[in-house]
Each structure stands twice: as C-alpha cells, then as structure tokens.
Image (cartoon, rainbow, N blue to C red):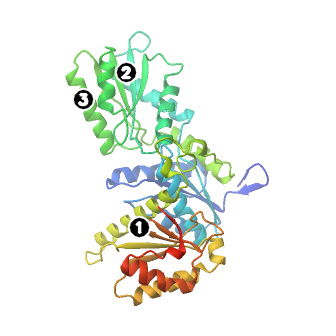
Amino acid sequence: MTVDAGSSPVALDDEAVLLVGHGSRRERSNEQVRELAAALEKRLGIPVDAGFLELASPSISEGIAGLAATVSRITVVQLSLFAASHVKNDVPLAVERARSEHEATIHNGAHLGVHPAIVDLLDDRIEAIERDQGADRRTEDIAVVLCARGSSDPDANSDAHKLARLLYEGRAFSRVETSFIGVTEPRLSDTLHALAKQRPDSIVVLPYMLGDGVLTQRIRDRTAEFDSEYPYVDAAAGDPLGTDSRLLDVLGDRWQEARTESVQMSCDTCKYKVELDGYEEDVGGARAMLRALTHQESHADRESVEENPHAHDAPEKHVAVCTNQTCAADGSAAVLERLRQATRDSDAADARITRTSCLGRCGEGPMVAIYPDGVWYGGVEAEDAERIVSSHLDRDRIVSSLVDQTL
C-alpha cells in the first residue's frame, strides 16, 4: 500500500506511528491512550503503538526503539491539547535523542491544537448537557465556559481562547468564556461568579481535558459547588473529550502533516523564539532545554527508586554533553568519556554524565551543560575534562575560560 505524499509515493508497509500521551498514575488514563492508538491503527492501516512522556510505560525512547526494530519510518504523533513545554521541548528532545540512536527516519508531529473536528465534538458535549437540563439554546440564555488546564506558556493559553471563540461563532449561546483550573487566570470559580451576575438561565462548563482524571473531577466539583450556591442558575459540567472517533480525524491530519514534513508550529507566538512581555528570559530555549533534561532525570530517578528501594538518590549535578553531528565531529565523544572517567576517579564529584542531542550552539562546541547550576561550557576539549571535574564538580568553582553562557 502506498500514499502519494506530494512527490514520490510513500510505502506504508514499512511505516509505523508512536502515539505519545502524557502518562498518568491513573491506569485508566493510560488505557485511554492505548485505546486511541488501537483505533488509529485501524484507521491508518499501519502499526500504531502508545508511548508516554512520564509516569507510564513505554517511554518515548522505548516506544521508538521497539518500532525501529521492524520499520524504517516512524512518525511521532502527539496526544497533547496545546503547544506548551511538553510539545515544544520534551518530545523534540526525546525524538532528537532517538534519531541519534536509530537508523530509522523519525518524524515529529504537532499537537492536537485548534481543529474543526474538536469544535464539533465540544458542541456535542454541550448538547448532551442541554438535553439533561431540558434547555434550548434557541430560546434560553445559555452561557458556556471552556475550562482548560492552564499553562505558563501564553501561546498555549491563547489557543484556549481561540477555541472558545470558534465555539461561540455561529451558535446561539449568549457567551462562551475561557477559564482555567490552575496555573493561570481567569480561574473557573472567578469566571462562574462573574457569569452569575449576568443571570443566564443555565451555564454549561466544558472540561477541556482528554481523560476523566483529577483535573476533570476538580472542574465538576467546582461547578457543583457553584450550582448549590446560586440556585437561580442551572450549572452543570460536561464530559471530557475521551476517545471520541473525531479525535482520530485530528490525529490522522497530524500524522499526514508530519510524514510529509509540513508541520506548522506556532513560532510567531512562541515564548522560546520571540520576546513576549513578561517572558523575556525564556527566549532562546536554553532554559527550557535544561528544564526538560532535569524533568526527565527526576522521573528516571523516581522510577528507579520505586523499582529498586536500594537505588541511590539523584546526583547533585547533571552534566549533559552534546553529541549531535557538529559537536561529535569536534570530538564530543572523547569529552564525554574523559568526563565520565574523571568523575569516577574523583572522591568529591556527585554527578551524572550523559549525552544529549543538539543544544542549539552549533559551531561553538563541543558543548557541555551543567545543571542545576545553569552553566554551559563551549569549545571543550578532552583535556579540559579533568579541570571541569576538579574545579566545578568537586569544588563548585566555575572554569571561567570555558564558559559559553550562564542561565
């Protein structure tokens, strides 16, 4: 079977998909990702496995490794609602690492984002509540609140507002408001109390979540509290997106975009690429990269402790050595091994030395990043390894002659 990707046909019998969900301690949420993966496999006619960012198995690296053993082309499709740090940092970092470890071609797809199928799905969720309430939007004043998780990324939060506006356009709601259950404002409780002053006949709260987890229940609880406090307004919360088949339409589009290299990210409003008021220090992505690395290591340490109660605590420092193409050509592999050897020989250094993919400083490497200190060394040579260990890792004294940047 082949598909015309716009140039030469692409064979599907040598291709697979890794559907990446966030991962949860609630196995039901993880099972939802697996259910969508099975449904997407049936829709596309190619193998689709589920992978997770954290808290569940397999990880992205494990999922890609399993598929790379059987196919030469892998497309990572992200089951994330909006483009925040996981989409912009964590998944790309995992994909870049996998590309350096496997011969397979690996494409990285976009998040679910704002899509007509999702707008239709949300409208159906509202209609279900209207039927339960006996309400009619054509004759009654019905207000809607789209409640998302909330993010520290303004780009992700603005998409929630866009989705709410699209839901309002052309439909007979008196208003559609956007609110968040955490991290940013306006919070759900504040939005509901503000709406009560306008005295609508009813309010429908839409949990903009994939699964029926902790945050969805929190939205239901807040809505129930409001409903009991304001008897003159009939308020109820709807269901999350779940495994509705219309999500497969969105995932199918994201798959096709990725495999034909036509993914369009929101770079014009990305806080890691443009300077937004209040987020100036995030420009460049260096801090985001370190946060992503730290986040992954913290989960790896926690999982190792859960599996082995005698496992050591997380090290005091983590040293990431770029082994991407340019740094590798400049000798980063030798730097990596010398750092590991010098750390083993040290009685004072408490550090983990790992390789990482591109740190975005091509031509200035080999690059070595040490965190949580936020110190990046550039132009590092193998013979510099002992100095980095004896000064920085042993005694917390930065090797100033090698510093590329500090965060």
What's the CA distance linking mark 1 and mark 3?
46 Å
Query: Would residue 101 be seen by someone viewing this image from the given angle?
Result: yes
Q: Nearer the viewer, residue 315 or 394?
A: 394
Tag 1 or tag 2, which sits nearer the N-term? Answer: 2
For marks 1 and 3 on the same chain, the one whose residue lies earlier in the sequence: 3
Do the residues bearing badges 1 and 3 touch, measured as CB atoms within 8 Å? no
Which quadrant would residue 239 be assigned to in this image?
top left
Distance from disc 2 to disc 1, alpha carbons, whole Å, reads: 54 Å
Q: Amino acid at mark 2?
A: Glu
Which residue in the structure is indicated by mark 2? 130
Q: Which mark is residue 291?
A: none
Of the two numbered discs 3 and 2 in the rendering, the one whose residue sits closer to the viewer:
3
Which residue position holds label 3? 224
Type of amino acid under label 3: Ala
Circle 3 residues within 10 Å: few <14, some 14–19, many ≥20: some
Tell me if residue 203 comes above or below residue 67 in the rendering: above
Label 1 Cα crowd, 10 Å radius (few <14 / some 14-19 / many 20+): some
Q: For residue 373, which quarter of the picture? A: bottom left
Query: Which residue is under mark 1?
Result: 373
Please state the horizontal and vertical placement of residue 67, each as a whole percent of the image.
56, 66
